[in-house]
Image (tube, rainbow, N blue to C red):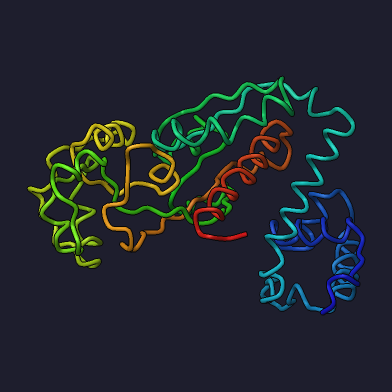
Amino acid sequence: MNWQAVSFDWNQVRAFLATAEEGSFSGAARVLKTTQPTIGRQIGALEEALGVTLVERSVRGLTLTEAGRDLIDHMRTMGEAATLISMVADGKSQDVTGEVTVTGTDLLSAAILPGVLKPVRQMAPGIRVRILASSEMQNLTQREADIAIRHVRPDQPDLIARHLGDFRATLYAATDYLDRASRPRTPRDVAALDFVGNADPERLMAPLHNMGVPVRAESFVMSSESGVVAWELVKAGYGVSMQPETLGEAEPGIEKVLPDFPSLEFPIWLVTHRELQTSRRIRIVFDLLVRGLSDIAKRRSGGD
């Protein structure tokens, strides 16, 4: 397919996105305040313009084809960009007011969210963001938060979940600790070092064993339920810890324990209520989080 020659109506993209989100033409028509036949015609026109089939229709309902699944994330990005551009152009983002609560783990909340959320103050200064440092999914179902950043996909039907990519983590330690303890040359050597863990450090033992590091429970000389505290313990030189690369690579005085040691990947899910469809302030914060966190995931995975 010659992508440079493709031309299509933005309404067709909106119809496809709404159908993918709602799972039916009727649901898309309800969200977009139009008719079911109109949705069908718009998607058909989009398929003709692109030269691919996006949606399969059967007695069991609608499902995305492989081409539809490949294109959905790109079209979502287009939709988010168009929404933000439109709001900035007509000044609506300046008029949006109210509080939006975002929840994430304490380490992510402290180290990553301040930078990612900075554009909110520029685009929509009337929005007040409250950050709830927590890893409990109940924060959303009990309406304690509007948006959650999680490492597992929720299964509650009233939540919308978006996979933004994967962050990577590997073993880091303070340079002064490795100077004292001597730098390991092999994964097996790493097991002889002191470790800093979280509240349940033994959960890390199995993946480390699989990666050739026979670490023992006694190796975890320091641990904390708080990711922020664990990171500070690493920086203070107490030992080795599995930490996100986005932190480890940027921190002076911290280095990889083994330069060629493989990374662990952990997914990043952005989760919100279905209220996202109607709340402009939640939509603005959600879309900016999508952009910021996706960019971080791409950089850390070596993507463009």
109 in relation to 49, above or below: above
In the picture, measured across the screen, residue 83 lies left or right of residue 107, that is right
Going 26% across and 38% down the picture, which residue do you hit?
234
Q: Quadrant of residue 24?
A: bottom right
Going 20% across and 42% down the picture, which residue do you hit?
196
From the viewer's side, name the closer residue of 253 and 124. Answer: 253
Going 18% across and 37% down the picture, which residue do you hit?
238
Give the total of numbered labels.
0
In the picture, measured across the screen, residue 36 lies left or right of residue 112, that is right
Q: Position of residue 152 (x, y in %)?
A: 43, 53
Question: Quick one: quadrant of the N terminus?
Answer: bottom right
152 in relation to 132, above or below: below
From the viewer's side, name the closer residue of 53 and 249. Answer: 249
Q: Position of residue 153 (x, y in %)?
A: 48, 54
Q: Position of residue 157 (x, y in %)?
A: 55, 52
From the viewer's side, name the closer residue of 32 and 255. Answer: 255
Question: Quick one: quadrant of the C terminus?
Answer: bottom right
Q: Position of residue 207 (x, y in %)?
A: 25, 62
270 in relation to 98, above or below: below
109 in relation to 163, above or below: above
Going 19% across and 40% down the picture, which residue do you hit?
177
The extreme left residue here reads 218
